């Protein structure tokens, strides 16, 4: 039984100091925690001020499979007893927020009972941050130094991974694997700066195509594991053979967990089963407004050097640090631009330099619709609903783009200029921000002259409460 096993491991690994002690359950029936041996352990937890957490990850696997319904009562009994005894033992579950449970299903009733006695924590507030990504990359670099001829992770690759893999540890692991195998080089990271769903689809399709080349049985096995996950290892081996399993493991498309096999990432499993791509999140912070950025882009596109572009706009340019550099860095998040150090020119591919403003806005929209701020706004507001500048400032603060000690106006105007140019938001009635009626087709889209928003604030407070108005190529 998982409770007995977990508590015994806490003792065996000396988390709790009870020498040569064995946990015994008086009965496998409820209540479980009245056992004398468990009560001794709970007393020790209190004395040593320690907590044991019994945690079930990926609980959606159980919630979405009818074959697991018979164990719901057992889970509920354990949860109720742990809630009742109020000891230093925590019973936890994690699950994806996008699963659907029919209202009158046994799964829905079970989850309703659990939630009544639980505290829900939204893990979107604890994303795989840039700090987490940097720590993982440092460990990966140490691995490369110790195990390969690669002695250092290129700084441009590091920057790319930091920009693209926040909140996506699976993607970080995937790309680091390709770097280790040397199927990705520094040059591969220059063609595109921010990853989008098109790139993710290419990654998934590449994996599928490569395995299909070996024969249909390999993909059939992969799909069987995806549809049946978690599935017993022996069951899969008996059905498809150990050679097929070995190859899928070798290519890191499946992993062994306990006595089961599963797909290496839930979102890849979902793509195999439902052809559904993950919801990506980017956290790009523009350094310049879209108006300034596109002015500079057009000058650079006319073969002016960075210094000449700065003089044309009467901008100070010293030691390579200026508005010009900021604009180039912003553009490089979306467009494959390369700066030439000696000449001061910026190399812009022919297919990019011929784009008009609306076509550029379309490219920006491909990425910015996955922005953490846009995703939050779209969750909160329906098409043609609006919110005030103050509400936008609160969203910036909530997502740590500004602090309580800084004025958000500059950040607000910059973000709004990019979002409105991309057609993802629009401004009406001065300081009211609207979610467009048609997605990605806000009235300012591609109209750069409409996207310069002033930081003025009205003194009129008569409105009271704001109202809702109608109106990869890498892989």
Image: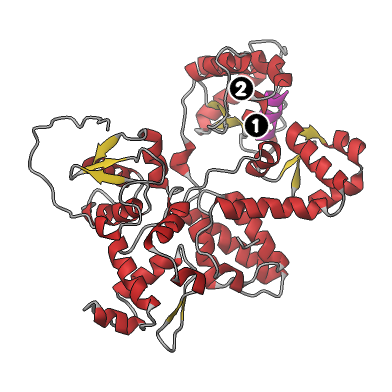
Task: Check if residue 9 falls in the magenta segment.
Answer: yes
Question: 340 or 225: which is nearer to us?
Answer: 340
Q: Which residue is mark 2?
A: 40
Q: Nearer the viewer, residue 208 or 436?
A: 436
In the displayed structure, would residue 201 be above or below residue 319? Answer: above
Q: Main secondary structure of the magenta part?
A: helix
Is residue 98 shown left or right of residue 309? right
Q: Is residue 220 visible?
A: yes
Q: Residue at x 55, y 24 (%)?
A: 43
Camera sees residue 289: no
In the visual, does 234 lie left or right of 366?
A: right
Q: Which mark is residue 46?
A: none
Per the image, the residue denoted by label 1 is 18
Q: Position of residue 341 (x, y in %)?
A: 44, 85
- Where is residue 228 drawn, in percent x and y? 76, 32
Which sits in the foreground, 446 or 136?
Answer: 446
Q: How far apart are labels 1 and 2 at the CA level?
A: 9 Å
Which residue: 34% across, 49% down? Answer: 400
Along the horizontal axis of the image, is 58 left or right of 397?
Answer: right
Q: Secondary structure at mark 1?
A: loop
What's the magenta region?
Answer: 1-10
Picture quadrant where residue 59 is located = top right
Q: Residue at x 71, y 14 (%)?
A: 70
Kind of element beneath mark 2: helix
| Mark closer to the chain start, 1 or 2 | 1
Q: Picture coordinates of residue 275 (x, y %)?
A: 66, 40
Q: Is residue 258 above or below residue 400?
A: above
Q: Are marks 1 and 2 in contact (CB under 8 Å)?
A: yes
Quadrant (top left/top right/bottom left/bottom right) for the N terminus: top right
């Amino acid at each position: 039984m998982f409770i007995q096993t977990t508590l015994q491991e806490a003792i065996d690994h000396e988390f709790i100091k009870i020498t040569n002690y064995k946990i015994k359950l008086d009965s496998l029936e409820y209540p479980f925690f009245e056992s004398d041996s468990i009560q001794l352990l709970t007393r020790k937890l209190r004395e040593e001020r320690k907590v044991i957490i019994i945690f079930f990850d990926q609980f959606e696997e159980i919630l979405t499979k009818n074959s697991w319904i018979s164990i719901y009562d057992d889970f509920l009994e354990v949860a109720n007893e742990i809630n009742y005894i109020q000891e230093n033992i925590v019973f936890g579950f994690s699950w994806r927020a996008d699963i659907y449970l029919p209202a009158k299903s046994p799964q829905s009733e079970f989850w309703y009972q659990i939630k009544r006695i639980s505290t829900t924590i939204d893990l979107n507030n604890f994303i795989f941050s840039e700090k987490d990504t940097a720590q993982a990359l440092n460990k990966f670099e140490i691995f490369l130094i110790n195990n390969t001829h690669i002695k250092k992770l290129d700084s441009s690759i590091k920057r790319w991974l930091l920009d693209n893999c926040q909140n996506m540890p699976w993607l970080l692991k995937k790309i680091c694997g390709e770097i280790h195998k040397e199927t990705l080089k520094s040059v591969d990271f220059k063609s595109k700066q921010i990853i989008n769903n098109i790139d993710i689809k290419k990654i998934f399709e590449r994996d599928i195509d490569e395995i299909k080349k070996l024969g249909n049985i390999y993909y059939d096995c992969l799909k069987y594991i995806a549809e049946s996950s978690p599935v017993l290892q022996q069951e899969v081996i008996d059905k498809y053979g150990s050679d097929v399993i070995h190859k899928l493991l070798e290519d890191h498309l499946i992993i062994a967990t306990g006595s089961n096999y599963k797909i290496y990432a839930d979102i890849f499993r979902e793509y195999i089963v439902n052809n559904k791509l993950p919801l990506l999140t980017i956290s790009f912070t523009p350094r310049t407004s879209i108006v300034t950025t596109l002015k500079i882009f057009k000058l650079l596109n006319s073969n002016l050097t960075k210094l000449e572009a700065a003089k044309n706009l009467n901008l100070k340019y010293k030691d390579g640090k200026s508005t010009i550099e900021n604009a180039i860095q912003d553009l490089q998040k979306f467009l494959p631009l390369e700066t030439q150090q000696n000449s001061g020119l910026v190399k812009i591919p022919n297919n990019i330099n011929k784009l008009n403003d609306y076509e550029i806005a379309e490219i920006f929209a491909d990425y910015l619709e996955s922005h953490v701020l846009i995703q939050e706004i779209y969750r909160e507001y329906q098409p043609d609903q609006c919110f005030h500048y103050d509400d936008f400032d609160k969203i910036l603060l909530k997502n740590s783009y500004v602090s309580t000690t800084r004025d958000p106006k500059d950040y607000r105007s910059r973000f709004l200029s990019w979002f409105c140019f991309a057609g993802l938001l629009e401004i009406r009635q001065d300081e009211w921000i609207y979610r467009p009626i048609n997605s990605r087709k806000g009235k300012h889209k591609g109209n750069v002259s409409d996207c310069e928003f002033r930081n003025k604030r009205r003194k009129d407070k008569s409105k009271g409460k704001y109202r809702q108005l109608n109106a990869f190529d890498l892989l």
